[in-house]
Amino acid sequence: QVQLIESGGGLVQAGGSLRLSCAASGRTFSSRGMGWFRQAPGKEREFVATISASSVSTLYADSVKGRFTISRENAKTTVYLVMNNLKPEDTAAYYCAARAYASSSSRPNEYVYWGPGTQVTVSS
């Protein structure tokens, strides 16, 4: 069993930055691919970024490429999402998720554990 807790969300003006953190419980974090997803009101959950267990592989949604950076510290069982140059369309609840495998993935149905989410609101 893995528990995930996101933090770092909040209200920020357009052009600003935030760093989201996702703290994971359990001893298997270092063997799991991790991902960030987001869901805006009235919209489906969408992929944001993913990172493999060893950090060798990362992948980003086109909408955030060049602005967001995913990273992880296995010793701290934490994955991060640094978000720069935020836009109002980035407003959403952001969710951290863990896979059963070491590889990264952009598909939400390939994740087995999810955090409760943290709200990010970007004002114009």
Image (cartoon, rainbow, N blue to C red):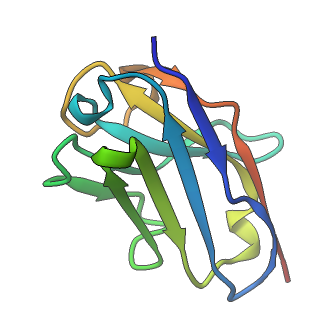
Give residue 69's position: percent from left, percent from top. 40, 68
* Residue sitting at x 30%, y 46%: 75
Residue 11 vs residue 72, the one in the foreground: 72
* Residue sitting at x 46%, y 57%: 80
Q: In the current view of this chain or complex, which residue is farthest to the front?
A: 75
* Residue sitting at x 21%, y 40%: 53
Q: Is 87 on the left-hand or right-hand side of 71?
A: right
Q: Is residue 59 above or below residue 3?
A: below
Q: Is 57 on the left-hand or right-hand side of 60?
A: left
Q: Is 18 on the left-hand or right-hand side of 110?
A: right
Quadrant assignment for the N terminus? top left
Q: In the current view of this chain or complex, which residue is farthest to the bottom?
A: 15
**Residue 70 sits in which quadrant?**
bottom left
**Residue 21 sits in which quadrant?**
bottom right
Residue 14 vs residue 30, the one in the foreground: 30
Residue 121 vs residue 26, the one in the foreground: 26
Q: Is 92 on the left-hand or right-hand side of 81?
A: right
Give residue 19's position: percent from left, percent from top. 58, 67
* Residue sitting at x 69%, y 39%: 117
Q: Is residue 112 above or below residue 74?
A: above
Give residue 59's position: percent from left, percent from top. 29, 55
Give residue 3's position: percent from left, percent from top. 54, 23
How many marks overall?
0
Quadrant assignment for the C terminus? bottom right
